[in-house]
Amino acid sequence: MRRGSGDRQPLFAYVTGDEAPVYRAIVDVLFDGAAEYRSDLTITVIEDALKCSDPPVVIEPKVLTDRLTQLHIWGNVDRDRDESWAPDLRSYELRAFVYNLSSKGEAAHEAVLGLEETLLRTIGLQRVALLHIGSVLGELVDQIALDTPDGDTVHNLAVELHRTFKTLTGNTGRFLQRVNHILNAPAVEIDEYLLFKVDTIHYLVEFTDHLEKVSDDVVLLFSRIDEMPEKYAAALEAGAKASGERIIDQAGSSMSWTEEAVLRIDGVRHWFVPVDGTPTGGQRLHRMVRRAVLGIGPLLDRVRDARLAGSGRASELLSLARKFTTAPNDEAAHALWHNEFGLAGARHFYDEAPQDGGPIIGDWWNAPAARHTIKLRAISANDQTGRARRTPNHGATKRFLAELARKRLAEHENAHLALVRLGRTKLSNIRRLANHATLELLAQLIAQVQQAPHDPVRGRRTALSMDGRLNITLADPIAGSAARISSPSGHWTLPDYQIHVRWTEES
């Protein structure tokens, strides 16, 4: 099998550049003309065909000429002078060009069309391909077991096994890519979600149930192949002879049919048979399908939020106001508040799932009416609703912020405990604090207590912390004394106060 040279192919530049849609439309016109045996297309004919295409493409004749010239440079298009009416050589040279799709350009366009057809192929035949792999491999093993295997049959079965397995893994790979794209995308297209849901259900209903049974059969078939290595090699040699292949001795550029068949069959083996604890392709597919199923719920929530996000907020506020008005009592109104917004008391702001709603302060019925802006009253009757096509995913950001808040709260609480455990002590006796949060809290408390009135008789200051949980007493230092406190974030030198931090009675 000849290897590619790796050179760049300008024939495919027309589908990768900035003007790819225009180039593609022009090549489609020339490709259709070649299929209908119409040759020597003029600028006018191509321009009219572009206008009649779906969707229509309107392009100036000069620009169209430039695009065709570029396609000619890339090798996709052949051009010649229009000789339909040219009485002499001078007239021929003055004629405009006519265009045809070159043989290389036609081959390149057929490759592009084949690629697109492959990418758009659904997984409807996945179950059939899976069962066919088991059937073909079984027939191949039966041929290997014969003393005189039929070379043509071995060759055809090996080719069919590779073709079917390539179709199976190609479609499976596209499904795995879609799962990764949908579940990790910052925004979700609703149409993409619907296709994703259909594919996931299809894999659950029609594919994964058969995968386990076929995998067990394939493992047994490969164990039979391992029991007869000599017959396996002889069968592949017979298949190589039947292939009619001639190997040209060119270093690094060819591979025998036997070597290629061994690699392809081993690829099937590695996809179905576990080796050294490494998950097989089927096991990875099972995990990905499970991940896709678990991801459908959150994706549906995001799609629902997107539909609501485009609606008018004024109508929603008015609907909520009517619900509050019809609430039978104060408890029902507060229950409505919690159900609609998921909010509890302010002191439970960081709690992920508060155990209680906190004390109700004030009566909702006697609270002053909310004041609405003029803009809200003005647009409430004519508010327009819309549909959000893209659904941002802020789940990762929310989880990160929630985890960060919990971490800060834990550090803050540990800092409180560390300072209370010090008791009455001089700062010079502390020497080192475990973390920066404790040092920061100590600095805040000292700065706060220094704002309190000074007791000249006792030589100290007393104050409460900002949250009211700590009582801090700071005694005057001995003149000229200093303390140095270290923490992982640095050192702090200050007068050697005597400090006493304790819990208040309320806390």
Image: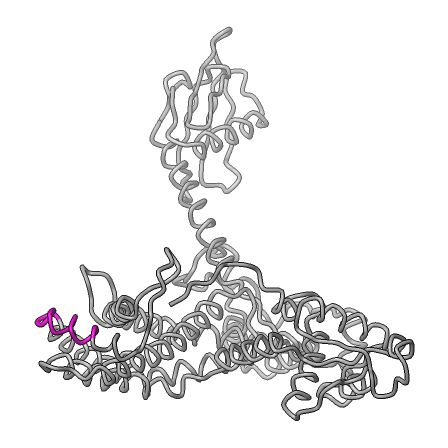
Quarter residue 86 falls in: bottom right
Who's the residue at 52% across and 80% down the image?
114
Figure quadrant of residue 412: top left
| 322 vs 46, nearest the viewer | 46
Above or below for 403 versus 172: above
- Please give the name of the residue rendered at 35% of the width and 84% of the height, measured from the top-left corner: 126
Question: Viewed as shown, does residue 201 lie left or right of 195?
Answer: left
Q: Residue furthest bottom?
A: 36
- On screen, 98 above or below 71? below
Q: Position of residue 6 (x, y in %)?
A: 50, 59
* Magenta stretch prevailing secondary structure: helix
Question: Picture coordinates of residue 64 (x, y %)?
Answer: 80, 75
Instruction: Decide if residue 133 is on the left or right side of residue 40.
Output: left
Residue in the foreground of this view, choosing between 209 and 64: 64
* 228 within the magenta span: yes
User: Which residue in the rendered view is the most extreme toward the front?
Assistant: 88
Residue 491 in the figure: left or right of residue 146:
right
Q: Is residue 289 visible?
A: yes
Q: How many marks?
A: 0
- Percent x, y for residue 378? 81, 77
Q: Is residue 458 visible?
A: no
Question: Which image quadrant: the N terminus?
Answer: bottom left
Verify whether residue 51 appears in magenta: no
Image coordinates of residue 472 in percent, x first then y, are 46, 30
Horizontal placement of 95 versus 444: left or right? right
Q: Which residue in the rendered view is the most extreme toward the top?
A: 480
Q: Which residues are magenta?
A: 226-237
Question: What kind of colouring is applied to the model shown?
Answer: one colour
Quadrant where the C terminus lies? top left
Residue at 56%, 25% (x, y): give it: 450
